[in-house]
Amino acid sequence: MALFQELGLSQQLNNAVSKMGFEEATPIQSETIPLALQGHDLIGQAQTGTGKTAAFGIPLIEKVDASVDAIQGLIIAPTRELAVQVSEELYKIGQTKRVRVLPIYGGQDISRQIRALKKRPHIIVGTPGRMLDHINRRTLRLQDVHTVVLDEADEMLNMGFIEDIEKILSNVPENHQTLLFSATMPDPIRRIAEKFMSEPKVVKVKAKEVTVPNIQQYYVEVQEKRKFDVLTRLLDMQSPELAIIFGRTKRRVDELSEALNVRGYSAQGIHGDLTQAKRLSVLRQFKEGSIDVLVATDVAARGLDISGVTHVYNFDIPQDPESYVHRIGRTGRAGKMGAAMTFVTPRESSQLHNIERTTKRKMDRMTPPTLDEALEGQQRIAADKLVETVKTGNLSYYKQLAEELLEENESVALVAAALKLATKEPNDVPVNLTAEPPVVGKGDKNRRGGNNGSGRSRSNSKNYSQQNRRGNSKRFGDKRRSNNSGGQGNRQNNRKDSRTKA
Ligand SMILES: Nc1ncnc2c1ncn2[C@@H]1O[C@H](COP(=O)(O)OP(=O)(O)OP(=O)(O)O)[C@@H](O)[C@H]1O
Ligand SMILES: [Mg+2]
């Protein structure tokens, strides 16, 4: 790690980064910032959560002449949420220099965007479709652009986006500088990328693994129809501060978030069929912690930086290894710890190995928690909460009654009762989830269905009810259910201050 002061930045930029609380530059930042400032085209590859945004943001802001009222930098991002987030980070970097940054993305009122464009922003951060739209309307003029950034470049250069990108670039002066960043850069895509650039420097942060070491990675062998119960037990046992659960399809995300709510978790889904307003509001609630669990398709997997995400659950194993890297990379960011659990059904073991081959890292096997372990986890949260309240709560109002209760009851029994009331006990309310076909890994002879998204056969989907078919249910009997009404409220409070464990 190097100090930012050693990277040859202006005083204004040094002030900006220290105001953002950055002390040292991350490896990708210290390697790419000087090269970018020298004007080289760049391909930057570094692990998730290691500061790639500032790695392109700092040199771009440095190069902007704030006294010139024209768009000088263009940042293209694959999703609207990411465009918003990147523009916020760039705004912070450029604040001391008074650089104007504007996000433009689909789903937002276009006339409002046109008005904002008239205010002469210096940098535009946008999604390809809406940028093209503005170019066609002649409301976006790019003749003064000197720097183009593709964030999540491999995704952007994937088949779906490449034509849009080419069209956008044909409106930018030819001698512009191009910066491409991503945590993953498969070789065929890198070759496409190089065609867009002139003598690019390739900076690949030296790391043995594609994923960051501070994410503990587990796989859980589980049958499709048992997944939901295993998920809720894991949530109970691990009690994440914030968790993201990835499902394969939009329907899957809807069904999962519905089912989680039925079982007393505060969850919301996010996917491409929701309105833009809804997507942004779900994300905001998740960031604020008013929902604990975000259920998402891969749309949320690229680039989103939400602090406090301690656990990622791949309810469905990802279709390709790159997607795995980006999904689990939503935790363990900026040096923090994280845990990722990937569910693997019996026929998906080849896909598990396929992922491990690409990431060059083995996942540890985790056995699904028993009901007792799930309950223990929740009890521990309740106990922590109780002790915390002893320390910080204003209890004088309760002490008189407490003493009376202690005269008439045994003390251990009293505390046990308080714990019971404060514990969110696992429940088995039936939920409906449509089964997903397995993802069969590359090179698997028996491969059928499942590996190519939309074309996939749905013939083996069927509705069934997932319930706790637990062996040890008798021990708890119906008493366990009697306390569930108090569970949800407690969960909200308990989750926030419990420490996490994987
Ligand atoms: N030098 C630094 N010191 C401390 N924190 C930093 C530094 N640079 C970036 N960060 C913070 O680290 C977090 C992750 O950064 P960022 O989102 O840029 O990661 P990324 O490499 O783009 O990840 P992804 O591959 O998921 O897009 C952000 O919250 C960012 O503010
Ligand atoms: Mg990023």
Image: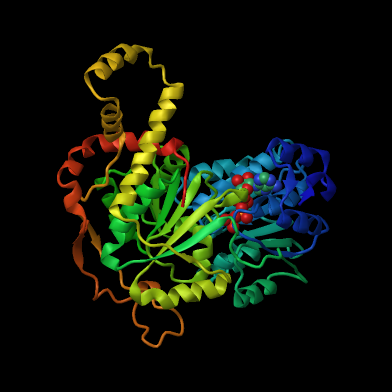
Q: Residue at x 64, y 54 (%)?
A: 50
Give residue 94's position: percent from left, percent from top. Answer: 70, 41
User: Tell me, what colour scheme is on the image?
Assistant: rainbow
Give residue 435's position: percent from left, percent from top. Answer: 26, 67
Q: Residue at x 28, y 46 (%)?
A: 261
The residue closer to the viewer here, 350 or 90, is 350
User: In the rendered view, would you say 280 is above or below 367?
Assistant: above
Give residue 26's position: percent from left, percent from top. Answer: 71, 52
User: In the rendered view, would you say 345 is above or below 271?
Assistant: below
Q: Residue at x 84, y 48 (%)?
A: 6
The quarter of the displayed image where residue 224 is located: bottom left
Give residue 194's position: percent from left, percent from top. Answer: 69, 73
Q: Residue at x 27, y 63 (%)?
A: 226
Query: How many circles with numbers are drawn on the protein?
Result: 0
Left or right of 215? Residue 42 is right
Left or right of 456? Residue 200 is right
The quarter of the displayed image where residue 291 is located: top left
